[in-house]
Structure formats: C-alpha cells, structure tokens
Image (tube, helix red, strand yellow):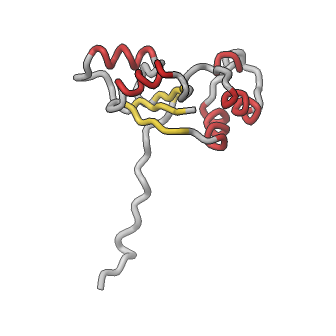
Amino acid sequence: MIAIIRIQGEVKVKPEIVNTLFRLRLRKKYSCTLINSSNKGLMGMLFTVRNSVAYGYVDKDTLVKLLEIRGQKIDGKKKNSEEAAKELISGKKLEELGFKPFFRMHPPRKESIPNYNTLRVY
C-alpha cells in the first residue's frame, strides 16, 4: 500500500501531468490517495507524477490513524478503522468499505521555534 500526497498546484505544470493527477484522484493540493503497489499501471502513473507528489509505503498503524482522522464516510455510519485497515491491506478498495477514495489533508505546519532569548552562546 502506497500513500500519495499532492504537493504542487496546477500552475506551469504539463497537461499530461495534470491529467494523470486527475486520474489518481489528486485534484487539489494536499489531497492524499492510496494505491496498491502491485498494480503496474498505477505505478507507471506514479512515475509520471513523481516530481509533483510525495509518496511512500504506509504501515498498518499509520493507515489506522489516517482513516480515523481524515477518512470521510460515504454513508455517515460509524466504522471501525482497524478492521477497515486490515481489509484495505488485504486488497479491498475504500469505496467498498464506505469511505471516500481520497483524503483531504492540511498543509504542513512549521515546527515550533525555540525561544532564542533563553539560549546562551559561549
């Protein structure tokens, strides 16, 4: 399971890359989607957009947190995110489990800057 997050907008981007991002359901900046790493077609699409996205393998704990915090239910019913994560890893799709096929993420936040008045330089 690979998570892909779009980090670039559409300004000065080739039309083929915009089309590929649209097909991957990455239509807005800071949206995330999950793909299966065994699908060669999706991996080719990922190779095409590799400079416009951030991607990496997802473990079960991260997937559970992602489903709890950012997973939007289609039918509005409460779902167990641990069971959904197991079924996703086994091969089911998000739509079959009652979740939207993408996640809306927040932009990255700046790390907290220490108070430089308390630092001593010798």
Compared with 66, 88 (above or below) is: above
- Name the quadrant of the C terminus: bottom left
Where residue 96 appears, x then y in whole percent? Answer: 69, 16
Place residue 82 in its image quadrant: top right
Q: In the shown orientation, is residue 102 left or right of residue 67? A: left
Where residue 47 appears, x then y in whole percent? Answer: 38, 27
Q: How many marks?
A: 0
Residue nearest the viewer, comparing 20 with 25: 20
Q: Residue at x 76, y 27 (%)?
A: 79
Place residue 16 in its image quadrant: top left
Specify the farthest residue to the left.
12
Q: In the shown orientation, is residue 13 left or right of residue 30? A: left
Residue nearest the viewer, comparing 57 with 114: 57
Residue nearest the viewer, comparing 116 with 17: 17
Q: Residue at x 46, y 18 (%)?
A: 41
Where residue 1 appears, x then y in whole percent? Answer: 58, 32
Specify the farthest residue to the bottom.
122
Q: In the shown orientation, is residue 120 left or right of residue 4? A: left
Compared with 110, 74 (above or below) is: above
Q: In the shown orientation, is residue 78 left or right of residue 11? A: right
Residue nearest the viewer, comparing 22 with 117: 22
Compared with 111, 46 (above or below) is: above
Q: Residue at x 48, y 22 (%)?
A: 40
Place residue 116 in its image quadrant: bottom left
Q: Residue at x 53, y 33 (%)?
A: 2
Where residue 35 appears, x then y in whole percent? Answer: 54, 26
